[in-house]
């Protein structure tokens, strides 16, 4: 298994209406699974990298609201502007800031809970044309709102799996 991609790399593909509903359910319920993934871990375990050269489990959790806040804003921009070019951020440097390296997890869980409640409400309100709207990332190119739903739903499952696979490999049950 590739420790970096325990569920495999993201594979963009057009979504059917049923697949879109499934992705939305996964995004809406994903924070519960993330909480379960770290439940009972000690501070020392949370401060262990999930793979050599990778982030600690704590940094992985804190990365999710950083990333998903950016994704939410990108979707809102795509829905209100004509194919805007978004500003990327340096996620590796954000993960090195003190709040991500040392901070308690609960704030990030609360941020994700609130953010996903709002984001999923936005997603549920979209028309067929809205799903096709897009933003442009300077390095990664064009992403539709539909593609963003798939990407961020995968992203939450991906990082949760990094934590659960680390727990399994380490015998931290």
Image (cartoon, helix red, strand yellow):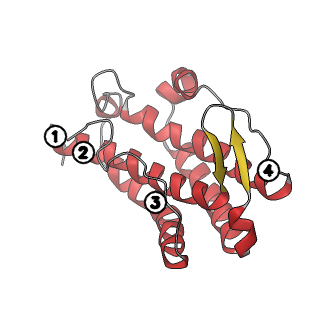
Residue 86: % across, % down:
74, 38
Are the residues flagged by discs 1 and 2 in contact, CB closer than 8 Å?
yes
Q: Work out whether mark 1 precedes mark 3 in sequence or the reverse, and give the earlier one.
A: 3
Q: Work out whether mark 2 precedes mark 3 in sequence or the reverse, and give the earlier one.
A: 3
Tell which of 117 and 80 is nearer to you. 80
Give the residue at x 58% y 57%.
Answer: 147
Q: Mark 1 falls on what kind of element?
A: helix
Which is more foreground, mark 2 or mark 4? Answer: 4
Are the residues flagged by discs 2 and 3 in contact, CB closer than 8 Å?
no
Classify mark 1: residues with Cα within 10 Å, few (<14), some (14-19) or many (20+). Answer: few
**Which residue is disc 4 drawn over?**
77
Classify mark 3: residues with Cα within 10 Å, few (<14), some (14-19) or many (20+). Answer: many
Q: Mark 2 falls on what kind of element?
A: helix
**Which residue is disc 3 drawn over?**
30
Q: What whole-number distance in Å separates the C-alpha atoms at marks 4 and 1?
A: 41 Å
Residue 167: % across, % down:
23, 43
Q: What whole-number distance in Å separates the C-alpha atoms at marks 2 and 4?
A: 35 Å
**Which residue is disc 1 drawn over?**
169
Classify mark 2: residues with Cα within 10 Å, few (<14), some (14-19) or many (20+). Answer: some
Q: What whole-number distance in Å separates the C-alpha atoms at marks 1 and 2?
A: 6 Å
Q: Work out whether mark 2 precedes mark 4 in sequence or the reverse, and give the earlier one.
A: 4
Q: What whole-number distance in Å separates the C-alpha atoms at marks 2 and 3?
A: 16 Å
Tell which of 55 and 151 is nearer to you. 151
Residue 45: image tag? none
Give the residue at x 34% y 32%.
Answer: 43
Residue 165: image tag? 2
- Looking at the image, the residue that sits furthest to the bottom is 18
Q: What whole-number distance in Å separates the C-alpha atoms at marks 4 and 3?
A: 24 Å
């Amino acid at each position: 298994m590739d420790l970096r991609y325990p569920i495999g790399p993201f594979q963009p593909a057009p979504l059917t209406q049923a697949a879109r509903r499934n992705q939305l359910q996964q995004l809406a319920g994903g924070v519960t699974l993330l909480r379960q993934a770290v439940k009972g871990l000690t501070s020392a375990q949370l401060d262990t990298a999930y793979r050599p050269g990778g982030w600690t489990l704590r940094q992985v959790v804190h990365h999710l609201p950083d990333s998903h806040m950016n994704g939410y804003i990108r979707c809102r921009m795509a829905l209100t502007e004509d194919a805007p070019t978004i500003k990327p951020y340096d996620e590796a440097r954000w993960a090195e800031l003190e709040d991500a390296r040392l901070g308690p997890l609960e704030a990030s869980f609360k941020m994700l809970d609130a953010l996903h409640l709002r984001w999923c409400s936005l997603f549920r309100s979209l028309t067929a044309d809205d799903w096709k709207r897009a933003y442009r990332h300077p390095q990664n190119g064009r992403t539709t709102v539909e593609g963003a739903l798939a990407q961020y739903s995968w992203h939450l499952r991906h990082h949760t799996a990094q934590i659960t696979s680390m727990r399994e490999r380490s015998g931290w049950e």
